[in-house]
Each structure stands twice: as structure tokens, then as C-alpha cells.
Image (spheres, helix red, strand yellow):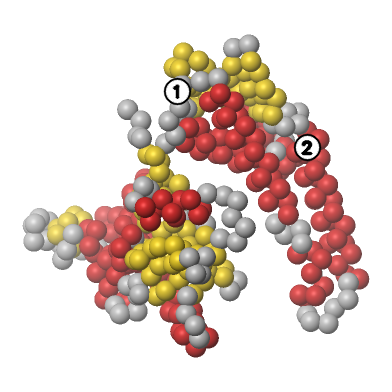
Amino acid sequence: MSKETMKLARKIQITIDLPTAEEKKEVWHKLYTWQDRCMRSANLIMSHLYVQSMIKDFLYLSEGVKYKLADEKKDPNGMLKCSHISSTYRMLSNRFKGEIPTNIFNSLNNELIKKFNRYYIEYVTGKRSLDNFKPDKGFLFGVPGIKRLQYNEEKKAFCFLLFSLPFKTYLGRDFTDKHALLQQVVDGKVKLCSSRMKLEKGKIFWMPVFEIPKEKHRLKPAVVAEASLSLEHPIFVRIGRNSLMIGNKEEFLHRRLAIQAAHSRTKAAVTYCRGGKGKERKLKALDRFKSLESNYIASRLHEYSRRLVDFCVKHQAATLVLMDMQQNSEIAKEEQFVLRNWSYYDLMSKIKYKAEKAGIELITA
């Protein structure tokens, strides 16, 4: 039986809710400290987990060494002074105690242990290297870290405390569901799960995970939608006698190539741009194209996948079959032009997410 809920992640910009510059500077320093300690902690956790798992292969150790990853108090053959999960947590606590909230340690430790266990076979067989964490990953924290989340009418923003540090959201021209999701959390209709905070170029981003109920539609198990993806038409879907062609080559591919060509022309002309303040002024024209292409493609793919799922809901299709997926995957791998410009896998992921939210079973053939 499928779950009645699903998890949804969002990226929300927030600002420090303090009056003076000195107070804000102090909070910034604390956030950068937490982010640095999390980066160092993540690398230490993965290193310790790997050594613990590979200690049996250290043939140069003496015969008296115990190999079992268990608490010596509970198992006579155990080599640890505590449980396996607690070993990395205690290592972090002894090293960074007082520098960072323990809730962040706990969340980071649990996430990395799950990840290590998921790829355990690949790690120990040498097919996968250990992850190298950098400061730009931000830091994790659990639900107890967020307190007093509420909407402030005067500030026109959602305000909350993160480990006693005050923040408020900056949603801007919010055309998405971020405001609605936060309001549902305040009202108790939606559950807030673990979150991540990230510092990027002088901005603070909060990335919460919401557990939301799936949409309930009157779908018929006997009705099946068949869809195919191609370059000529991004999506073609058929349900019985009803069919729909979503998007076209001119709208999607030609517009993308036009953006790439404009970027190339601007890049060639950067040499002749007037300088004066280092590279910042020279690259000012080029910076306009930094996210123009990705934003355009993301908006197109969101629209295409939404129209596909809406068409299935309209005709009560409980199952969506994506045809010729294996063939399309092989073409995308062989043809670099298709792989670079089609965004095939991104469209697949958006269709999967929206279908799951609508309660539609997705099958690839």
C-alpha cells in the first residue's frame, strides 16, 4: 500500500531579524563557524566509518586485535567503548563541544551513517570513493532547532528562532507555494521535517523539507496513459482516443540554442569591454547569462510535466506509462547534442515527482 504523504523540499531566502549591524555581524560569524565545523565533521565521520569497516583488512595488525563493531560492554568481542552509532557522535562532541549545537551534530551523524550504509558495498570494494565535503554544503538541523515559527503582519514575513537566533523569511514575488506551505506548518496541517541552512554569496538560504499529504483525485485503475518523449515534441501523451502534444522543438530547443549563441558572442566580446574594477566590470555583460539558460529550461520542464499530469488527472488515468525509455536513454548517451540540450533526465524527475504527488503510478517501458 502506497503512503498517503510525500516529502517536498523548498529553498527559501531568509535574513537576520536584528536591528543593529553589530548584532547581525555576530550572527553571521556564528553561522560561518557552524558551516565550517559541519564540513570538518562530515569529513571526519566518513573517514572514521570507513576505517571501522575496513579494519578487518588491515593485515598488519596483531592477532589480538578485536574486529567486531560493537560495544565491549554488550559483546565480549566488541572493540568499541560505546555503540557503533554513538562512536562518531562522541568523537565530534569531544572535538567541537561548545562550538556548535548538538542537534546539528546529531542530524549530520545520522544522515551520513545512513548514506554510508547505503553505499557500503561500493566503499569497501573500491568502486566508490569517500565523499569530500566542502563548506558550501551548509549544515543540517532537526525540527527542534526551529522554534516560534509564525507569520508577522508588521514585517510581512514568517519569523522564527534557529537555536535562539532570530530570522525572517524573504519570499519576494512568491509565485510558488512557499508561503502556503509555511502557513500550513503554522496551522499544523503540514509537518516540518529536517532542514538545511546554506550561506551563498552574502545570502542565507533555508532549505526545509515538508511532509505533505498527496492529492486525492478520482482516478480509475483501468485507465492507462501512454506518453513518449522526443526532440520534435517534448511530450506526446495518449489516453484512449484522447491525445495531447505538449511543447514543440521551436519553443524548447531553438530558444535554448539562441541563448547559448548569445552567450558565446558576449564571451568573445568581453575582451573589448571597459575595465576599471578588476574583472567584475568586464564580466558584467556575461554574468547576465549565468542562470538565464537554466532558469528558462527549468520553467519549460515544469510547465510540460504539469500539463502532462493535469491531462492524466482530467481523464482519470491512474497509471502513466513512459514508452521507449530504454531506447531514448541509449540515444541520449550516444548523441552528445541530445544529452547536452534535451534535459531528458531532468524532465523525467519532474514527471516522477508530480505523478507521485497526484497519486498516479509511473511505469517506464
Residue 292 place in picture, x, y as percent: 73, 54
Depth check: give the residue in front, 229 or 144: 144
Q: Which residue is rendered at x = 84% and y = 51% of the image?
A: 261
- Quadrant where the C terminus sits is top right
Q: Is residue 118 left or right of residue 243?
A: left
The residue at which mark 2 appears reads as 251
Q: Tell which residue pokes out farthest to the right in this image.
A: 272
Name the element at disc 1: loop
> Looking at the picture, how far across and down is residue 71, in whole percent?
14, 59
Is residue 277 shown above or below 15?
Answer: below
Badge 1 crowding class, 10 Å Cα cut-off, few under 14, some 14 to 19, many 20 or more, is few
Q: Earlier in the sequence, mark 1 or mark 2?
A: 1
**Total count of labels:** 2
Q: Nearer the viewer, mark 1 or mark 2?
A: 1
Of the pair 172 and 357, the residue shown nearer to us = 172
Q: Which mark is residue 135?
A: none
Query: Residue at the front extreme?
Result: 154
Q: On the rendered structure, is 221 left or right of 295? A: left
For image coordinates 62% across by 18% down, the residue present is: 238
Residue drawn at the location 49% of the way across and 69% of the way down = 154
Q: Secondary structure at mark 2?
A: helix
Quarter occupied by the N terminus: top left
Asked whether residue 146 appears in the rendered view, the answer is: yes
Nearer to me, 83 or 238 = 238
Q: Amino acid at mark 2?
A: Glu
Which residue sits at x=59%, y=12%? 240
Depth check: give the residue in front, 171 or 225.
171
Image position of 140 with respect to 20: above or below: above
Vertical relation: 229 (above or below) 90: above
Q: Residue beneath label 1, please?
A: 218
Q: CA distance from mark 1 to mark 2?
A: 33 Å
